Each structure stands twice: as structure tokens, then as C-alpha cells.
């Protein structure tokens, strides 16, 4: 029997967290926790695939000007929240093509800002609080997405998997899968870099980050969380106020 995800173009970065194994041996229930890139990019047939999941709730991490201009298709789901800011951390970063097309020292400064932005995204981000509240309340099947399904969506998946009890290797592996799904887009952007500023390391890294994710940044997100909180369990307590009972409820709801 054909897998439903096989009917979707890979660059949409649509994935089911179902089947991912936790440290206790349990796995995430299938067709319950879904992640994706921009839903406005789905064609008519792909929207029908989305409908087949009977999604209850969708959270869109894009900035308001994006979701107003490029709206998600109507599939009968509830929209939980729209929030494009992360505690003002990203206000000084130019996320446009121009911002990610800088060279020399400007490119290196952009890289430093982006790294800081993503490593600190798990702290004080209202949209992640809405996400975890919705999941704790069982509003599923649940889909979360941003523009390309790799950065904000990738970090959200890290938090979900960390709360469910995945080990760091598994969490990073899922984060890095965006590079597999978005391989063609990454290759095209990297070739563009080679055609213009192949000797500029900062520029080339920015070209890659426009379409893919960095393992160094992914690992830095995990390392900072352990440095600040000690463990994923303690992070959930400090950031979301979840005690052991809340964690057990969450895990029992989404694992089998």
C-alpha cells in the first residue's frame, strides 16, 4: 500500500513524527503529530492528501505579513495561533534574500545573529507555548509549519521529541532530515553561490541556510538547552511549568 507521504513533493518537507522511537522503547503514534513547510505551496492533489489526515488543529509559525499574503488552504482545521516573533531576538536580522546574500564580514555577522536567534528560540517564544498547550490538551491530529518547515518548525519538533523522551541523537537526526527533503532546493542555491562568490565562506553558508539547516546550529540548540536547564525534562518544567505528572500525561497521549 502506498504511503500517503509519497504523494507529496519532497520539497514541501511534510513529515509524520509517527514511528520515531523514544529512550523507553515506545514510539510516537502515527498520523497524530505532523510537520510541514508552507501549506500554500500544496497543489490541489496535495491538499486532498492533507485532508485525509483529518487534521484538527494547525499552528503557523510564519510572520503575520506572510500568512496574510500566502494563506493556508482551508481544510476544516482550527488555527491555533500566528506568531512570527521570538521575544524580539530576531528584530535586528534581515531574513530577506538581501540579508542572506551578504558577503565578507557582513555575512559573518549575519551568521552570528542567525545562530544566536535559533539557539535562543526555545525560550520565551509565545507560539511554542501555544503549541505545547494545544498538544497537552489533545487537539489532534495536529500540524505545525512555517515557510519551509525547517527552522521554526524544526525547533518545535525538537521540543516535542525532547518532551516525549527522545535522545539527543534522535532529535538532531529529525532536525537534519530537512536537508534530505529539501536537497534539490539546497543544491540549486549552493550552485548559485558557486556562480557568484565561491570563495566567500560566509556567503556560501548563508546560501545553504536559505534552504537547509546546519548541523552545527542544531547541535548548539541542544547543547545550550542542556547548559541552561540540565535536561529536556527540566526544560519543560522551567519553560512551560510541566511537572512529572504533566510529562507523563503528554507521553502517554502520544506514545505507544
Image (cartoon, rainbow, N blue to C red):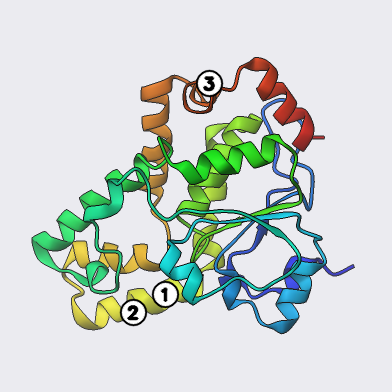
Q: Residues within 10 Å of mark 1 (few under 14, many from 20)?
A: some
Rendering quarter of residue 95:
bottom left
Residue at 40% over, 35% down: 123
Label 1 near label 3: C-beta < 8 Å?
A: no
Q: Quick one: 22 or 233, which is closer to the camera?
A: 233
Q: Disc 1 to disc 2, how far (Cα)?
A: 6 Å
Label 1 residue SS: helix
Label 3 residue SS: helix
- Front label number (3 vs 1): 3
249 displayed left or right of 36: right
Q: Residues within 10 Å of mark 2 (few under 14, many from 20)?
A: some
Q: Which mark is residue 191?
A: 2
Residue 39: x and y in percent read 60, 70
Question: Disc 1 marks which residue?
Answer: 187
Whichever of labels 3 and 2 marks the residue nearer the N terminus, that label is 2
- Front label number (3 vs 2): 3
35 displayed left or right of 155: right
Q: Which quadrant holds the C terminus?
A: top right
Against 20, is 57 above or below?
below
**Whether residue 173 can be seen here:** no
Question: Disc 3 marks which residue?
Answer: 237
Residue at 44% over, 19% down: 230
Against 134, is 26 above or below?
above
Label 2 residue SS: helix
Label 2 near label 1: C-beta < 8 Å?
A: yes
Residue 208: x and y in percent read 35, 66
Amino acid at each position: 500500500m502506498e504511503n500517503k507521504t509519497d504523494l507529496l513533493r519532497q520539497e514541501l518537507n511534510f513529515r509524520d513524527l509517527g514511528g520515531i522511537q523514544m529512550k523507553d522503547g515506545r514510539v510516537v503514534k502515527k498520523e497524530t503529530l505532523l510537520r510541514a513547510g508552507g501549506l500554500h505551496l500544496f497543489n490541489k492533489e496535495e491538499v486532498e492528501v492533507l485532508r485525509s489526515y483529518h487534521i484538527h488543529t494547525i499552528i503557523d509559525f510564519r510572520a503575520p505579513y506572510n500568512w496574510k499574503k500566502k494563506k493556508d488552504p482551508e481544510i476544516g482545521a482550527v488555527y491555533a495561533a500566528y506568531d512570527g516573533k521570538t521575544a524580539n531576538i530576531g528584530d535586528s536580522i534581515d531574513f530577506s534574500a538581501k540579508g542572506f546574500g551578504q558577503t565578507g564580514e557582513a555575512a559573518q555577522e549575519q551568521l552570528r545573529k542567525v545562530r544566536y536567534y535559533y539557539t535562543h528560540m526555545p525560550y520565551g517564544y509565545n507560539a511554542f507555548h501555544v503549541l505545547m498547550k494545544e498538544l497537552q490538551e489533545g487537539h489532534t491530529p495536529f500540524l505545525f509549519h512555517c515557510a519551509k518547515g525547517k527552522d521554526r518548525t524544526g525547533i518545535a519538533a525538537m521540543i516535542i521529541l525532547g518532551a516525549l523522551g527522545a535522545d539527543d541523537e534522535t532529535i538532531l537526526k529529525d532536525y537534519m532530515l530537512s536537508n534530505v527533503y529539501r536537497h534539490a532546493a539546497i543544491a540549486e542555491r549552493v550552485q548559485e553561490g558557486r556562480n557568484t562568490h565561491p570563495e566567500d565562506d560566509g556567503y556560501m553558508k548563508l546560501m545553504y541556510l536559505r534552504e537547509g539547516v546546519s548541523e552545527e546550529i542544531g547541535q548548539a540548540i541542544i547543547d545550550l538547552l542542556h547548559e541552561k536547564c540540565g535536561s529536556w525534562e527540566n526544560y519543560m518544567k522551567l519553560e512551560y511549568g510541566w511537572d512529572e505528572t504533566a510529562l507523563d500525561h503528554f507521553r502517554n497521549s502520544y506514545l505507544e
